[in-house]
Image (spheres, grey):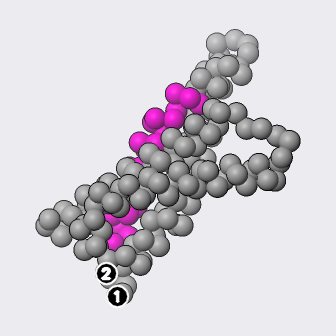
Amino acid sequence: MRLRHLADRIRPSLIAVLAGWAAAAIVTLPMQIAKILANTFGSPMVLLRSIAEGTFVWALWSLAIAAGGWAFGLLPVILLVSESWLLLHRRNSLILASILAWMVVLIEFHVWDIVYPYYTLPVRMFTLYSLLLVIYATVSAAVYLRLTAAKEGK
């Protein structure tokens, strides 16, 4: 694969990752704000500061997760799978992206259970990360396929 061709495939993937991250962050942000509200005590100023700081931390953390998803998920697909195959199998690609993202969450929580057998994670955490990764992966794949199809004229 030529370097120019690779750059032409990476550019839309970065746009797709940002779109997927934004969609996933918007969907999961209310859960985070509810948790912040439940854990904040004090004056209204403390509440506003907690919401601002909590939102900032969640945005950075979810962006780091999105960067990892790009580096270990979308980038290998770009390098190994041809654009024509992805465009020919759009529906299967979206379904596979969703399933693989949820499998990552399941594996992550299973490893957590092995490492910390006496510590149980709340259902909220599982739901939060499931939503984050599945929405991120599905939206990123859909946007990437849309941008690739537009580039190809299909």
Q: Which residue is mark 2?
A: 5
Residue 123, by quadrant, is top right
Residue type at the position of mark 2: His
- For the point 52% across and 27% down, which residue is it? 30
The amino acid type found where label 1 is placed reads Arg
The CA span between labels 1 and 2 is 5 Å
Checking the image for residue 2, the label placed there is 1
Question: Residue at coordinates 42% horizontally, 77% vertically from top-left?
Answer: 79
State whether residue 55 appears in this view: yes
Q: Quadrant of residue 44?
A: top right
Q: Main secondary structure of the magenta part?
A: helix
As drawn, which residue projects farthest toward the right? Answer: 118
| 30 on left or right of 9 | right
- Residue at the extreme left: 153
Give the class, few, some or many, for how many residues have Cα within 10 Å of label 2's Cα (few <14, many ≥20): few
Is residue 7 found left or right of 151 in the rendered image? Answer: right
Disc 2 is placed on an element classified as helix
